[in-house]
Image: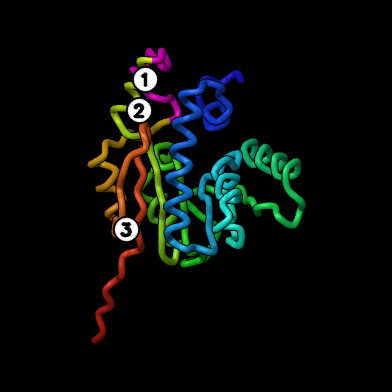
Amino acid sequence: MKNSHGNLQKHLNPNPAQRWLLERFHRRIVQLVVSTGAQNILDAGCGEGFTIQKLRAAKTLEQSEIAGIDFSAAALAWNQGQQSNLLPAEKHTPLTQADVHRLPFPDNSFDLVYSLEVLEHLPDSSLGLRELTRVSRDYVLLSVPHEPFFRGANFLRGKHIRAFGNDPEHLHNYSGRAFRQLVSEQLEVLWHGYSFPWQIAIGRKKQRNINLK
């Protein structure tokens, strides 16, 4: 693996501590998805498909329809290749190359939209969150690095030293308060918690007031 950062590197890293942290994170994500009862799900920023694989393995989600989008053609190609190796064609997750700022779906298309480790990469994270909320008819599940702890953990293990532990692909850094404030602009926050070194929030679309005259 040539890169010292990125989603693929993170998930294929053999470090046992990192693998344990990722497993704990994914268990929490699966629990939250299951709790919504969603049958129609979008992974916005699916990358190589690691989270989709975890959801597919959950028996309670076997009948759910899951779609994925990502901006990276290389990540989608890797994702598709893994599906071809592991699953029959009729069980493949439909994948689309798209920008989270401009999702190619009508309003209220999915019971649940989740976007993990994506907002910190977006030039306009508020616009991205509005799009995620627009295409959901109910729930939105999000995660971002919990700062400054994410950077601190990187720095202590000698990663991105010159940037004081900050990943070069991260355009935004969210403390717990800043992340909750961002999410609450679009969603009614149902739960906000932590799975070190990440933070997670799940919310529902706010009911828009209609002024009838």
In the picture of the structure, the residue carrying the numbered disc 2 is 150
Residue 178 percent coordinates (x, y): 25, 41
Q: Residue at x 27, y 47 (%)?
A: 180
Q: Residue at x 26, y 39 (%)?
A: 176
- Asked if the residues shown at circle 1 and circle 2 are in contact, with their CB atoms under 8 angstroms apart, the answer is yes
Residue 96 percent coordinates (x, y): 62, 51
Residue 80 shown left or right of residue 11 in the figure: right
Q: Residue at x 33, y 39 (%)?
A: 194
Q: Nearer the viewer, residue 50 or 119?
A: 50
Residue 92 percent coordinates (x, y): 69, 52
**Of the residues shown, which amino acid type is indicated by label 2?**
Phe
Labels 2 and 3: the sequence-earlier one: 2
Q: Which mark is residue 165?
A: 1
Q: Is residue 162 magenta?
A: yes
Residue 49 shown left or right of residue 204 in the figure: right
**Of the residues shown, which amino acid type is indicated by label 1?**
Gly
In the picture of the structure, the residue carrying the numbered disc 3 is 187
**Of the residues shown, which amino acid type is indicated by label 3?**
Leu
From mark 1 to mark 2, how far is it between C-alphas? Answer: 8 Å
Q: Which mark is residue 209?
A: none
Labels 3 and 1: the sequence-earlier one: 1
Q: Residue at x 54, y 64 (%)?
A: 39
Residue 51 percent coordinates (x, y): 54, 44
From mark 3 to mark 1, how far is it between C-alphas? Answer: 30 Å
User: Helix, strand, or loop for circle 3?
Assistant: strand
Q: Which residues are magenta?
A: 157-169
